Image (cartoon, coloured by chain):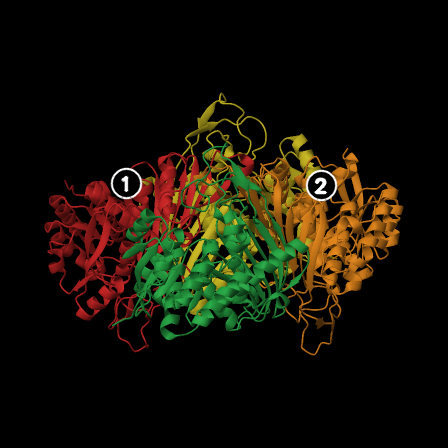
Chain colours: A green, B red, C yellow, D orange
Amino acid sequence: MMKKLNVGMIGGGFMGKAHSLAYAGMPMFFWPAPAIPHRHTVVDVNEGLAKDAAARLGFDNYATDWREVVNNPEIDVIDIVTPNNTHAEIAIAAAKAGKHIICEKPLALGAEQAKEMLEAVKAAGVKHAVAFNYRRTPAVALAKKYIEEGRIGKVLSFRGTYLQDWSADPNSPLSWRFQKKIAGSGALGDIGTHVVDYARYLVGEITDVNAMTKTWIPERPIQTGGIDKLGTVKAGSDDVPKAAVDVDDEFITMVKFDTGAIGTIEATRNAHGRNNFLTFEIHGEKGSLYFNYERRDELQVCFADDPSDAKGFRTVYSGPATPYGEGLWPIPALGIGYGETKIIETYDFFKAISEDTEFSPNFNDGYQIELIADAILESAEKGQWINLEKTAAAVK
Amino acid sequence: MMKKLNVGMIGGGFMGKAHSLAYAGMPMFFWPAPAIPHRHTVVDVNEGLAKDAAARLGFDNYATDWREVVNNPEIDVIDIVTPNNTHAEIAIAAAKAGKHIICEKPLALGAEQAKEMLEAVKAAGVKHAVAFNYRRTPAVALAKKYIEEGRIGKVLSFRGTYLQDWSADPNSPLSWRFQKKIAGSGALGDIGTHVVDYARYLVGEITDVNAMTKTWIPERPIQTGGIDKLGTVKAGSDDVPKAAVDVDDEFITMVKFDTGAIGTIEATRNAHGRNNFLTFEIHGEKGSLYFNYERRDELQVCFADDPSDAKGFRTVYSGPATPYGEGLWPIPALGIGYGETKIIETYDFFKAISEDTEFSPNFNDGYQIELIADAILESAEKGQWINLEKTAAAVK
Amino acid sequence: MMKKLNVGMIGGGFMGKAHSLAYAGMPMFFWPAPAIPHRHTVVDVNEGLAKDAAARLGFDNYATDWREVVNNPEIDVIDIVTPNNTHAEIAIAAAKAGKHIICEKPLALGAEQAKEMLEAVKAAGVKHAVAFNYRRTPAVALAKKYIEEGRIGKVLSFRGTYLQDWSADPNSPLSWRFQKKIAGSGALGDIGTHVVDYARYLVGEITDVNAMTKTWIPERPIQTGGIDKLGTVKAGSDDVPKAAVDVDDEFITMVKFDTGAIGTIEATRNAHGRNNFLTFEIHGEKGSLYFNYERRDELQVCFADDPSDAKGFRTVYSGPATPYGEGLWPIPALGIGYGETKIIETYDFFKAISEDTEFSPNFNDGYQIELIADAILESAEKGQWINLEKTAAAVK
Amino acid sequence: MMKKLNVGMIGGGFMGKAHSLAYAGMPMFFWPAPAIPHRHTVVDVNEGLAKDAAARLGFDNYATDWREVVNNPEIDVIDIVTPNNTHAEIAIAAAKAGKHIICEKPLALGAEQAKEMLEAVKAAGVKHAVAFNYRRTPAVALAKKYIEEGRIGKVLSFRGTYLQDWSADPNSPLSWRFQKKIAGSGALGDIGTHVVDYARYLVGEITDVNAMTKTWIPERPIQTGGIDKLGTVKAGSDDVPKAAVDVDDEFITMVKFDTGAIGTIEATRNAHGRNNFLTFEIHGEKGSLYFNYERRDELQVCFADDPSDAKGFRTVYSGPATPYGEGLWPIPALGIGYGETKIIETYDFFKAISEDTEFSPNFNDGYQIELIADAILESAEKGQWINLEKTAAAVK
């Protein structure tokens, strides 16, 4: 009999949908599954929304108080899909209750908070994951494989971007993502951290940053009512009162890696025409890689030692012959969507739980990324290089 | 209380997985759902596989005899995901039992069989669908919207292709897809019919065809044991006995539409480097469209009346502002995968059942497509134009 | 001392410009040059235009009577860049005068006329070329190299297109290109023959065609005064009188090759957003090729025997390591323009003259292409396959 | 009678070829020409090479001493296409002799030298140009037009790259481009300055830089004999002695503009698969632009105010409707090559001479770019922001 793990999910917005689909779909794709995720209870402070979420997302129960769920002995896994400012309190409580935890990114409002979370899960001995799901796009896992196998040689440089435009309109609302007290930071935490995760995953540890930030739209219409839909709901009229944005719309940083590689990372929410333009370009001594999440089935790779009359970037479609491919679809280009990245993430996390291994990226990775994010903000403010080794406090 | 419809699914291979994901995920995406699909029973002739499929795909029950399920009064919807040669018998029985039916494509082994199926569902008054899911890629639905709104003017020409390479290797096995008695035809039925569906959906009724077919690999290693994985499992050694392929590997046809438009349709399984290269290019009096399923988030559109210094194909990403977008992901390019096409298909079919409207493509469309497929084979054999109006027998 | 060959160029429009640039530039690129083209005399019936053309295009002399130039003993090469209906008379006279001839495409108004031209140059023993310059795009020459070296195996299918939109506007003028008596045919002769040239160059001899043609815009404003600029000059107002177009705007043909390969060729001038969309896709037993002249520095190639986790189309930029590359620019992607195709053509033709070898495509190729074009028109009219072997009359 | 200007060209390598083609071709494209460039004398220190260059490139005369040509009263224009370390001496002498000057980029070995050159041409009152020809790619001129017309609104950020791989092989020779005393700097001066030119042309003046540089291949085989072919000639064997590279292979810089915009500029010669990957991405308040010289016929533009269901990057091909298009080819995508950029540059420079206007980019631009390049090196060395206003010395 296959093991079942009961999930308590805190939050029921867009991310709750994505995670729920992954819980339902994971065993369909990866079979035998390491464990069957069972949608036990979903939480929303609003009872009506909670009830609705349970029906919609296929949970057996709903609740309005996350503490109750965190302490429910039937629950094995706590899934945190709430705004950033709530992650720490929930995660620390869940750790104390001995639950395995998967938490949406960014892990916390800053490194200090992340450190507390990391200490809590370490103390509790539970499994912990931060949901940087884009790392689990099969084409990105293929890039990792090439690098690990030495197929592009030593990495010299990394260029990562995350460009969006959903909030480029000055009339898109002041959702929680534009408020420092809830989000911690702006484009940096929301999307830039995904690129930082790619950089650490594919190249190595970032040791130094040197950054600029910009807030292009200094104030936005106050959002009234309703669920945050990432700004797709525009304020109805021009007389909606506005309030200040106190986070970054864009940042650019140069980075140095412990491997000697260098690079840049850039994220903005003011790039008209870029929807989810999460990219990297990597130059190695023996080859190059390019990936663009907008065309996520594909990885571009160039091998230096190809014949001179047939050298060039190959467009490789992920599929059965590439990582995770056996579990996914039978041929390449049937189509990897957002859901698949979450299905793979769920698979790997439930496998880590079942096999008692370490999932990556975990809270330590989340903490490191918070350190880097904090350093980026500090660098931008001071106008100088910030060395990470000096700023990081050890967690044992 | 939201209505629940019990599904009996006949077959549990790759397509069963895709459909199961759609049943689980549809209400997560489209809420309130027109009805909740409940995975009641899955059928496989092999009891072990059936049991396994139920556990994996989330069905409450399993069975080894499809007739039993078709006649189970608890079942509302029969989902047929078995090889082509079994569609007719199951569908006709299901119709007689008063079940709504969704059947994988192509509908039948030929037009004659399809006609019987159509007559059966008409007689029974049940809802019927053929699973040409690629029509429900959001970017394709956007193309339809543009055309209906007249934004590219009268359509002049249509060029559709479906190119694959998973069986381009002569050592890929002789699965059922290469056997006429099971598949009906080769690339034509398996993939070409999707393009025919696009042509009818986007342009109009096909009145004449003029075709060629080719079987590039005349014999293949006999497949022993195991589930068909579309040929991704190669025969282990060279001494596996081979048998003849009696279907087409490739076909090309010219077509005429009732609207005066002309075009070509082409499908092959021998196009190295093309994975799921389902494309169309449409030229209208006022604009053009291009779509490639390998980059399925995108639709290319050119409007003739753009300023002369800014005229060119636009890459439009489907998202909240395009068809089905409200229900899917909150911003464009988060990612449409194969699953989403099936989720949308399920949504529309369950809506048709709930609202007692006609789903499209239905068994009549499936029948028309079989007529066209038969005519393509006839044309290739005779080397001449075949007029469809003369060959089609009426179904009332 | 390097040999100099005096050129007499009949016509001075856009093509005259392109050829003149090639005469000036060829030795700069290919050195030592097989012979130095000297721009001796340019001809235009209008004396003012002729004088102007000489100054502009760098010819020493000008003339208004082409016969005078054809019979000038100082002239070595006659370059025919006039409308199609004049090619035959000039070429035959030039051959009789013992001049080497390069003639713009299509060679003639039809096969019969082309045959006379071919007989004339054969009788005279002069060198002859038809200016299907697109064959000399370096990336296309690379495709030829791959095929000849067996790197994509036996060719199974060929798909060629030539799509344009410069005359998609019903108000673009009735230039000579829309008049049968001057142009011979429409999109077929003007652009489709380039694709036929590709097909014969890359795959083999075409033995059968089965075609459709369409004239989408049945009448256009009469052009008054001025040089044909391919329709970029629009008729000034709606009250310009119109006259009938008696050639095709679009054609589609299926083709069979003597090698067993099959394919389609399609050309249209009504494809909004396609500017000079001259493409081919070739599927071979061991690989595939794709080329699009709009991105002419690039050839896409997929090799079947690449590792399964790194198989995909490579984007190879032509450059020093590919055909003609030593003579062109020092690194790939500095940029191949239209001019370079003409420079290479000039180089190869002057080399053929100097080394007394056969240039290809020559008048025989031009004649074969006319046979195919005639067969396409005949097939479209009759609605049936036309076999080329039966229609071709031998030329010895 | 059209004015003729005699050109004395100092140097006859790859750049000499490109310029010669432009002199021959410019009037063919732009007619009436502002003035006819006459190829009067070409100079090479080696008499054999000089003689050969004259024959090959179409010059009437050759010389071995550039001073003689600079002082020849028949010469109107001096064209400097020699390595960087010779620019200053020749240009200053030419200015004193009253010649108009076009000088290859980068202008000098550094800002100090550039300033002397600028002072010389100002004192002499001659016309002066720096050959940043990539600015004259028609698609780039179109980008400039959009920006000037406000079609993408206020520019927020600029991202420019110039990536190459011709010297990524550690065995490619130590040509002059890798020696500081001849080249001044490495990737920075050779290719990075083109991006700096784009940034200043399209966005505004750069006020601050913050950079990193890397020399990935610290030593290379000594080049023996022969003309520099950009490294395409590899050292024949492993026992060729090596010497140190003392310039950068790669640099990355963050930049601030006087307009408030920010950005990054990056150039490397170690990007396998990137041939001439000169790109920019510009985000404005009302739209975005993307350009990649490897596909130089195209400009990508997204307009923010497009309908929400049809918003996306347009691929606009330069042609008759875009800048310089009337003079070039009759339809878009016939093909812009490297030659065309030089032809347009020549046209604009000869027009500036004829009409007594200021050409841009001129020696002042060249000087500003040297200031920026020097600041980039200084910033990389010091690890801090460098403000340009403080470092620039005025030139009146």
Q: Quadrant of the N terminus of chain D?
A: top right
Q: Read off the chain for label 1.
A: B
Q: Mark 1: which secondary structure?
A: loop
Q: Mark 2: which secondary structure?
A: helix
The residue that disc 1 covers is B205
User: Can residue A289 be seen?
Assistant: no
Residue C255 position, x and y percent, is 37, 51
The residue that disc 2 covers is D347
Instruction: Using the rendered view, name the quadrant where residue C33 is placed.
Output: bottom right
Whole-angstrom CA distance, mark 2 to mark 1, is: 55 Å
C386, B44: nearer the viewer: B44
Residue B24 marker: none
**Other residues around mark 2 within 10 Å, as few (<14) / some (14–19) / many (≥20):** many
Residue B158 position, x and y percent, is 37, 43
**Other residues around mark 1 within 10 Å, as few (<14) / some (14–19) / many (≥20):** many
C86, D114: nearer the viewer: D114
* Amino acid found under the numbered disc labelled 1: Glu
Q: Are marks 2 and 1 in contact (CB under 8 Å)?
A: no
| B387 to A301, vertically: above or below | above
Instruction: Using the rendered view, name the quadrant where residue A70 is placed.
Output: bottom left
Residue D380 position, x and y percent, is 72, 61
D241, C375: nearer the viewer: D241
Q: Read off the chain for label 2.
A: D
User: Can residue C53 be seen?
Assistant: yes
Q: Quadrant of the C terminus of chain D?
A: top right
Residue A358 position, x and y percent, is 44, 72
> Left or right of C310: which side holds B5?
left
* Amino acid found under the numbered disc labelled 2: Tyr
